[in-house]
Amino acid sequence: MVKMEIKGLLMDPVSNMPVVILRDASDGVFLPIWVGIFEANAIALEMEKIATPRPMTHDLLRNLLQELEARVERIVINELKDNTFFARIFLTRGERTWSVDSRPSDAIALALRARAEIFVEEEVLEKSKSLRVDGDPERLKKWLEEVNPEDLGKYRM
C-alpha cells in the first residue's frame, strides 16, 4: 500500500466534474479520482474547515463512530474495475476491527473528518496508469503536470 495525501480538489475543465487529486508524498505520483458533486462538496467543506449549522452525512458518520467509541484507522482505495475505484474503511473498537466497503469519495470525506490516513493499493496505481480520459490519457498527465499548485488547494464550483 502507498500512503497518499489529498493534494487538491478541482473541476476537470473538460468533463466539468469534480476531481480529487491524491498524491504520494514520497515520489509525487498523482491519482485523480472523479467524484460526484455532493461528495466533492462534503470533501471541500472539511478541507476548508467550513462549519455547517447541522451535521452533514459524513459528520453524522463521524459522530456516530465517536459515540460508539470506534475510530477510523485508515481508508484504502483497493480496487479499480471498469474505470471505477473501490475503497474500504477500516474501523476499530477495542480489540475488534471491521473493514467496510465504500465509494472512495465517501471514504475520503470520512477520513478527513476522522483524521485517518489514506492509502492506495499499488495494483490500483498501476492500473490507473492505463485509464483513458476522453480517449487521451496523455492529456490528463499533461494537465496534472501543468496545473497551477494554487488551483489544487481550492475548490470552486
Image: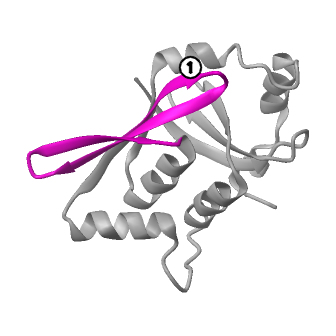
Q: Is residue 142 left or right of residue 36?
A: right
In the image, the segment drawn in magenta is 75-103
Q: Residue at x 34, y 70 (%)?
A: 63
Please say whether residue 88 is one of the residues in the magenta stretch.
yes
Amino acid type at image mark 1: Leu
* Residue 62 x, y percent position in the rendering: 37, 64
- How many numbered callouts? 1
Q: Main secondary structure of the magenta part?
A: strand
Q: Residue at x 59, y 62 (%)?
A: 42
Which of the 4 image quadrants contains residue 145?
top right
Which of the 4 image quadrants contains residue 131?
top right
Name the secondary structure under disc 1. Answer: helix
Q: Which residue is mark 1?
A: 125
Q: Residue furthest right?
A: 14
Q: Is residue 153 left or right of residue 98?
A: right
In the figure, 120 relative to 16: above or below? above
